[in-house]
Amino acid sequence: MINIGVLALQGAVREHVRALEASDVHVIPVKKVEQLEELDGLVFPGGESTTMRRLINKYGFYEPLKEFASKGKPIFGTCAGAILMAKELVGHTEPHIAVMDMKVERNAFGRQRESFETVLKVNGIGNDVPGVFIRAPIIQEVGDGVEVLAEFEGEIVAAQQGPFLACSYHPELTDDNRMHQYFVNIVRKNTVHA
Ligand code: GLN
């Protein structure tokens, strides 16, 4: 069976575990660097990106996560997780794990609309995907190799670059598991078990 980890330093971990388990994969909450070895794919959950980054540094995850990505192992980031994946962050000099060619702005929907729910058309998934946005980022720009999967009011809110998938919203907070299934398919295609 395929092993998918959920980085469990901070944020909505349990919800991702539940959503992934619906796809019949083995899910591992990842608290120690050694656990990365056994994974075929990894989820960066939502939460607070600066806190998550602080814990990534504190527990020695920074280099191992960069290495995980450089091997082309699939990563799915939601909300704060997507922020961790961006190579460029508006208003920040340094990115975090920096695996996708995209420029991301944090908390981009403003105070009036800190949290809201909508229905999204997501390429390859459906035109009725629930989007729960909580102090969500937007993807301002993407590079050539990045496919835009969803937009909301003209702003990019989901994108894929090869094995890397990012969205601004929280599919794990709904009972619609299609985004997770889509990621599991990426992992399955990427994984050749001997
Ligand atoms: N605003 C948060 C951040 O900048 C992300 C919010 C979320 O993950 N729900 O990290």
Image (tube, rainbow, N blue to C red):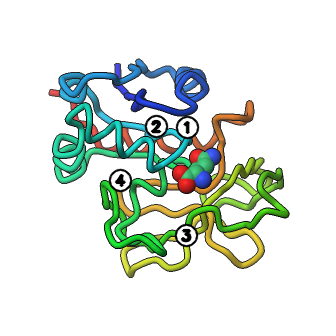
Q: Is residue 72 visible?
A: yes
Between 17 and 106, which is closer to the camera in this rendering? 106
Q: Locate residue 77, reporting x and y percent.
A: 47, 48
Query: How far, Cα to Cα, is label 3 from label 2?
Result: 27 Å
Query: How far, Cα to Cα, is label 4 from label 3?
Result: 22 Å
Looking at the rendered image, the disc whose residue lies closer to the viewer, 4 or 3, is 3
Query: How far, Cα to Cα, is label 3 from label 1?
Result: 27 Å
Residue under the point 40% across and 63% down: 86
Query: Alpha-carbon neighbours of circle 2 within 10 Å: few (<14), some, or many (≥20)?
Result: many
Query: Alpha-carbon neighbours of circle 1 within 10 Å: few (<14), some, or many (≥20)?
Result: some
Q: Which residue is mark 4?
A: 163
Question: Mark 3 vs mark 1: which is more N-terminal?
Answer: 3
Q: Is mark 3 within 8 Å of ligand 1?
A: no
Question: Mark 1 vs mark 4: which is more N-terminal?
Answer: 4
What's the amino acid at mark 3? Answer: Glu
Between 26 and 81, which is closer to the camera in this rendering? 81
Q: Locate residue 31, reporting x and y percent.
A: 33, 22
Q: Locate residue 36, reporting x and y percent.
A: 24, 29
Q: Which residue is mark 2?
A: 184
Q: Is residue 188 visible?
A: no
Q: Which residue is mark 1?
A: 181
Question: Mark 3 vs mark 2: which is more N-terminal?
Answer: 3
What's the amino acid at mark 4? Answer: Pro
Q: Is residue 104 above or below residue 45?
A: below
What's the amino acid at mark 2? Answer: Val
Which disc number belongs to residue 105? 3
Is 34 placed left or right of 28 in the picture? left
- Check disc 2 and report its element: helix, strand or loop: helix
